[in-house]
Amino acid sequence: MGKEKVENVVIAEHLTKQYDGLTAVNDISFQIKRGERFGFLGPNGAGKTTTIKMLYGMSPPTSGKLSVLGLDVRKQVREIKKRIGVVPQETNLDTELSVLDNLLVYANYFGIPKNAARKRAEELLDFIHLEERANTMVDALSGGMKRRLLLARALINNPELLILDEPTTGLDPQARHLIWDRLMSLREQGVTIIITTHYMDEASTLCNILVIMDEGKIITEGSPAELIARYTSQEALEIRVIPDQTQKALDILIPKSKSYEAQDETLVFFAPSADELLKTAEEAKLKIEYVLVRRTTLEDVFLKLTGRRLRD
Ligand SMILES: Nc1ncnc2c1ncn2[C@@H]1O[C@H](COP(=O)(O)OP(=O)(O)O)[C@@H](O)[C@H]1O
Ligand SMILES: [Mg+2]
């Protein structure tokens, strides 16, 4: 038997954060192993930002235990900060400075000597495809470029742990894919990545393990594939029929499905084989306006567990 030791980069036990009266994070426990890409997925207000602010020493826990890289967040914040990189939810770049200077100022915080800092900054600008913008003022950058610069800044000290709070919220698809691509390449370098998101596709693409949070609690944990298998059947039939046939569709298809949901006008039936459901619908001569046979996704899991109620 090998004696390989699985190293936990983060251990949280009964972690709680209260802001006078409001419990933003409510007694959560989790562990994050070295090399994982760990996601906190949840609707607005779930407590994702509060959780990771505690991880990077921005906000002290009200109660519970929390260690990062084997260090206590209450007592060893400075040591932790040296070894991690953070991309916060708000873009907090220095708008009075150029792209390159934003990186050099940060390098200086970490005590990186000038020549090494310049070399590292240039490598990072290549890495995030901003090499042509080194001397551009931050204000002139697009939203996607600013996010990439935040990523480069978070990497200036070669962190072993990278923490990102909603790294692609508000970006267009091209900008999102570029960030995803860069994060995947960091994974290959062995960096542990912690990310919060409310985008299911982002969680599916980037994370090998996820917790879903809602109202300050962790409601489930697993890989994207495990969660899909645990909470949904394999396939879904989405169907819209002419209005006066809705009841008929329900009567015919519910008995053949494991579960169903009405999403606006569209009925969604979950079953091991959506093709079989479709055959049943066709044999019953339902007047179908729209139909889609698909595999179930993380979005189905998310909506099932967190519901459809709007959050702020
Ligand atoms: N500094 C703060 N003071 C008071 N309440 C806060 C503060 N930060 C967050 N909250 C509240 O804590 C809850 C969780 O917020 P947050 O962690 O930002 O959620 P998420 O990042 O999942 O959207 C929300 O109800 C939010 O309003
Ligand atoms: Mg947040």
Image (cartoon, rainbow, N blue to C red):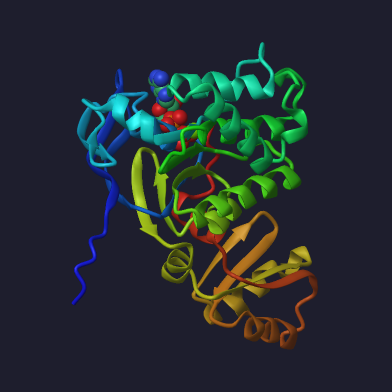
Residue 145: where, in percent of width, then height? 71, 33
Up-down: is 284 above or below 192?
A: below
Q: Count up the numbered dots.
A: 0
Furthest residue to the front? 115
Residue 226: where, in percent of width, then height? 43, 68
Between 267 and 123, the residue placed more toward the observer is: 123
The quadrant the C terminus occupies is top right
Res 56 quadrant in image: top left
Q: Residue at x 64, y 33 (%)?
A: 122
Between 122 and 219, the residue placed more toward the observer is: 122
Up-down: is 74 above or below 197?
A: above
> Quick check: 96 left or right of 39?
right
Q: Residue at x 40, y 45 (%)?
A: 213
Up-down: is 40 above or below 91?
A: below
Between 270 and 46, the residue placed more toward the observer is: 46
Q: Residue at x 36, y 57 (%)?
A: 221
Residue 182: where, in percent of width, then height? 61, 48
Res 61 quadrant in image: top left
The quadrant the N terminus occupies is bottom left
> Quick check: 224 left or right of 244?
left
Q: Residue at x 73, y 47 (%)?
A: 173
Up-down: is 118 above or below 97?
A: below
Residue 200: where, in percent of width, then height? 56, 53
In this orientation, does residue 45 appear? Answer: no
> Quick check: 2 left or right of 132?
left
Furthest residue to the top? 96
In this orientation, does residue 177 appear? Answer: yes
